[in-house]
Image (cartoon, rainbow, N blue to C red):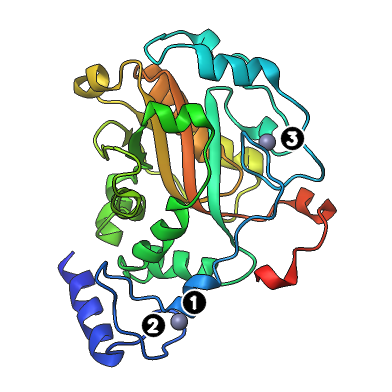
Amino acid sequence: MLMRTAVQGVRALLLPGACLICARAHEPTSTGDIVCGVCRSRVVALAEPQCVRCGHPRLSVQLPMPAMAMQASTVPADHATPTRYRDNLPTCRWCPRLHPALRAVRSASRMDRGTGAALVHALKYEGWTAAAVAMARAMSRLDWPEDVREEQPLLVPMPLSTVRRRERGYNQAEVLARALRAALGRRWALVVSADVLQRTRHTQSQVRLTPSERAGNVSKAFAVPTAQRARLRGAHVLLVDDVITTAATVNAATEALLDGGARIVSCVTFGRAPDPGDRALPDPDPSRT
Ligand SMILES: [Zn+2]
Ligand SMILES: [Zn+2]
């Protein structure tokens, strides 16, 4: 922690009043945003139309899902039963990778265009925790199914292993969750709880692994501490992470949350990695890049 603070101090001396991404002059805003308006506007959203469940760009208009929509809006929040999500059926080609208990997944930025990847790198690998302010601002504008908004889920950052947290000095997902909480203001009365989910073993970086290797790498890597089970019982959890790629990590965390008593899980990430299937999508609108 001390080392990170020292590094940040040096950078602040080198780049006084400069945008974190483009280094042009930019005075930090009252919310601590050190990314200039131009770089913020170059966070490129995922293409429309999107799947209402997983938030992934779709090829065409979505087929109706009457069973899921009805269940989601008519079942009381305290109705703790696995049948609650039995109709969370895959509705697009990206959905099948999701755990059946994942109600809705949303991401704010493409990783292959614009400034999204640079923001993630600054937050995750360069110690720039203030990058989370601009990232959370984009995440706070995401659109959610009505039942997710109404249930006011518990914000749970994706945990890091003790080893990784010590190396980095902070958990970037927790920084992001707190920034998202602040960016949402009074619109959502969400509570950040960083204690309900723990990473029980150190896993290797997912970056160079195949999808099946990723799933094996994070399987059983999470757990809910016994003391947190009462808090989680019947809850709708909104997992927060920096990037979603194959959903292996989110699925493993979802399984642990269900074991710990959660009823249903949604997930919000800043970035979403490009998928090979995206090649079939039409070219993005150049005005949005
Ligand atoms: Zn800039
Ligand atoms: Zn989908």
Q: Are marks 3 and 1 in contact (CB under 8 Å)?
A: no
- In which quadrant will I find the C terminus? bottom right
* 263 lies left or right of 66: left
Q: CA distance from mark 3 to mark 2?
A: 38 Å
- CB at mark 2 closer than 8 A to ligand 1? yes
Q: Determine whether 287 is above or below 133 in the image.
A: below
Q: Where's ligand 1: which quadrant?
A: bottom left
Task: Bin the neighbour count of mark 3 within 10 Å (Cα to Cα): few under 14, some 14-19, many 20 and up.
Answer: many
Q: Residue at x 29, y 59 (%)?
A: 167
**Residue type at mark 2?**
Cys
Question: Disc 1 on helix, strand or loop?
Answer: helix
Q: Is residue 135 left or right of residue 154?
A: right
Q: Which residue is mark 2?
A: 19
For label 1, count other residues whose C-alpha is less than 10 Å away and answer few (under 14), some (14-19) or many (20+).
Answer: some
Q: Which residue is mark 1?
A: 39
State the image coordinates of residue 128 (x, y, percent, origin top left): 32, 70
Q: Is mark 3 within 8 Å of ligand 2?
A: yes
Amino acid type for the residue under numbered disc 3: Cys
Closer to the camera in the image, 139 or 279: 139
Dot 2 crowding, Cα within 10 Å, few <14, some 14–19, many 20+: many
Amino acid carrying label 1: it is Cys
Q: Nearer the viewer, residue 275 or 281?
A: 281
The residues tagged by marks 2 and 1 sit, at their Cα atoms, a distance apart of 8 Å
